[in-house]
Image: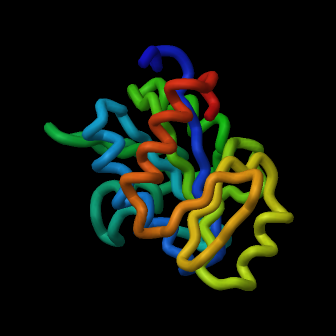
């Protein structure tokens, strides 16, 4: 698998509490175990997430007005910017950090290939409102004639689907 160039990108989209994070936390070890270096981008739609803790040094630097704050240790690094960032820029940053597969939670309106997660039957309307669908992951029976469909518990099948798409597709899966 030659993934040294651009990373493969796959979005996991669904409504709130559909199981996106749980699905990703089950997929990541299988994909990493298959030799991929997985990066993840989470969209915090409408919430103003807080990365560091009030009173800690990095929080104090941001509160003092720093536009960008970085912290590093023997085992990890984090950079927090005081501005939103476009998904394409974040994908490139993860690629520069060594990711050859970028899984994106959310960003429904972006154009990357998507697996749609459907928890309830009424969630199926999402299939008509997002672009570039490559598969459906469902909590129940869900058959889309033109799309591969997986049950949410078929983690091995979903991971195999992702690996196969990477092997046969150009960088953006």
State the quadrant of the N terminus.
top left
The quadrant the C terminus occupies is: top right
Q: Residue at x 39, y 39 (%)?
A: 38
Reply above or below: 144 against 133: below
The residue shown at (50%, 34%) is 164
Q: In x, y percent, where is residue 26?
A: 34, 60
Q: Residue at x 43, y 43 (%)?
A: 160
* Image-quadrant location for residue 118: bottom right
Q: Could you tell me how many numbered marks the image carries?
A: 0
x, y percentage for residue 161? 50, 44
Can see residue 50? Answer: no
In front here: 145 or 45? Answer: 145
Q: Is residue 60 left or right of residue 140?
A: left
Left or right side of 72 for 47: right
**150, 19: nearer the viewer:** 150
**Percent x, y of residue 125:** 81, 74
From the top left corner, tell me how far across and down residue 122 is, in percent: 74, 84
């Amino acid at each position: 698998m030659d993934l040294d160039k651009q990373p493969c990108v796959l979005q996991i989209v669904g409504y709130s509490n559909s199981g996106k994070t749980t699905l990703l936390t089950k997929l990541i070890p299988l994909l990493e175990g298959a030799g991929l270096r997985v990066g993840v981008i989470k969209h915090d739609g409408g919430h103003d997430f807080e990365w560091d803790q009030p009173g800690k040094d990095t929080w104090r630097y941001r509160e003092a007005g720093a536009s960008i704050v970085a912290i590093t240790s023997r085992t990890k690094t984090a950079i927090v910017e005081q501005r939103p960032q476009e998904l394409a820029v974040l994908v490139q940053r993860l690629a520069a950090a060594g990711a050859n597969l970028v899984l994106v939670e959310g960003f429904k309106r972006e154009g990357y290939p998507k697996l749609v997660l459907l928890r309830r039957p009424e969630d199926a309307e999402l299939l008509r409102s997002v672009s570039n669908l490559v598969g459906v992951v469902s909590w129940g029976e869900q058959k889309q004639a033109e799309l591969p469909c997986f049950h949410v518990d078929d983690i091995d099948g979903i991971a195999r689907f992702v690996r196969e798409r990477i092997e046969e597709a150009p960088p953006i899966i």
